[in-house]
Image (cartoon, rainbow, N blue to C red):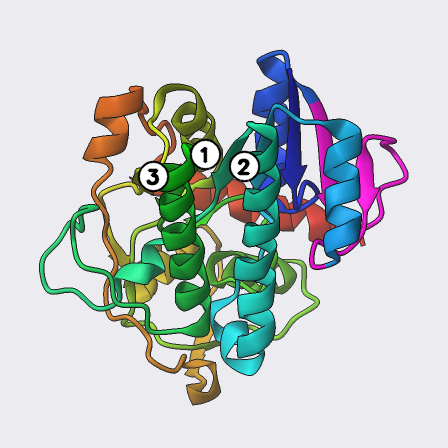
Amino acid sequence: MKALITGINGFAGFYLKKILKENGYEIFGIDIKKDKNSKHIYTGDLNNREFTLSVLDSVKPDIIYHLAATTSVRRSWEIPFQTIQNNYIVSLILMEWVKNNNKRLFIMGSGEIYGNKKNFPIKENSTVNPLTPYSLSKYMGEKSAIFLAKNFGTKIFLSRAFNFTGPGQRDVFVIPAFSKQLAEMEAGIREKILKVGNLSAIRDFSDVRDTVKAIYLITHKGKPAIPYNIASGKSYSIKEILTKLLKMVNFKVKILENREEFRKNDIKKLEGSAELLKRHTGWKPVYNLEKTLEDTLNFWRKKVSER
């Protein structure tokens, strides 16, 4: 069996590749970053329809895991049309190929599409209300996938992943950003002042290793055209998360609020229910938040020490 991962050199792609190899898949990938270590990874822009279709026609994967995306909510406000291009139009290209070739496709969605809610945890039958270019782009892709599945029988699997983090995530995201700065302070190469954004935002964080296991199970035990929440079912304020990280270092840090870090249309709270995912696939999260934070901090400690 052949699997092709878009964004294979990215955060989730790194971990998904491991699971697929463990389960006997031959792995191929497309990534914007060049990889000299693998002849099975094609370098190029997924927006280039001819390039993307030529790779797919050459590899003929049995399943495509579409992880590549513009993933930063804040960045999506700076490049709204590019975000929709990267996250929606590319998905349409992949949908076209799997429809015409009778193959399977997984599309990574987001819990951000729910917008602001009052009742928690959020279930899949809750109304959606995209508030950012990022969440809008994800919702457009999901609706198109459901349309194709219902009208053409195309096997497209869907997720609505809430926040996930862990070792290896880029420091443009909140937990690795905190962890990197704390590791640099610990090493004596950064002043012990931490600039923060909105600490009152409340989020549901899963470990990336649990998230990619959910992705694998959705495509092997889940049902096409059903969006599955991937969530821990627990939520914490960013302040609570920062407090947990600060307890893992042996020094005091001065906290400075930076209003420029606040997001437009920021969602106050996200907390999802993964009961449908658990019922259909048997998924069970393994990592708790404390273990995820510890592993992420240790990742950045190691990275800082190698400079």
Do tag 3 and tag 1 residues touch (Cβ < 8 Å)? no
Q: Quadrant of residue 184?
A: bottom right
Classify 10 Å Cα crowding around label 1: few (below 14), some (14-19), many (20 and above).
many
Q: Is residue 152 magenta?
A: no
Q: Which residue is mark 1?
A: 154
Point out the image quarter for the C terminus. Answer: bottom right
> Can you see residue 99?
yes
The residue that appears at 23% across and 48% down in the rendered structure is 272
Do tag 2 and tag 3 residues touch (Cβ < 8 Å)? no
Q: Amino acid at mark 1?
A: Thr
Q: Quadrant of residue 237?
A: bottom left
Q: Nearer the viewer, residue 80 or 212?
A: 80
Q: Which residues are magenta?
A: 27-47
Do tag 1 and tag 2 residues touch (Cβ < 8 Å)? yes
Q: Which residue is mark 2?
A: 99
Q: Nearer the viewer, residue 241 or 205?
A: 205
The Cα atoms of the two marked residues, 2 and 3, are separated by: 12 Å
Majority secondary structure of magenta residues:
loop
- Give the SS element for disc 1: loop
How far across and how far down the image is residue 152, in percent? 42, 37
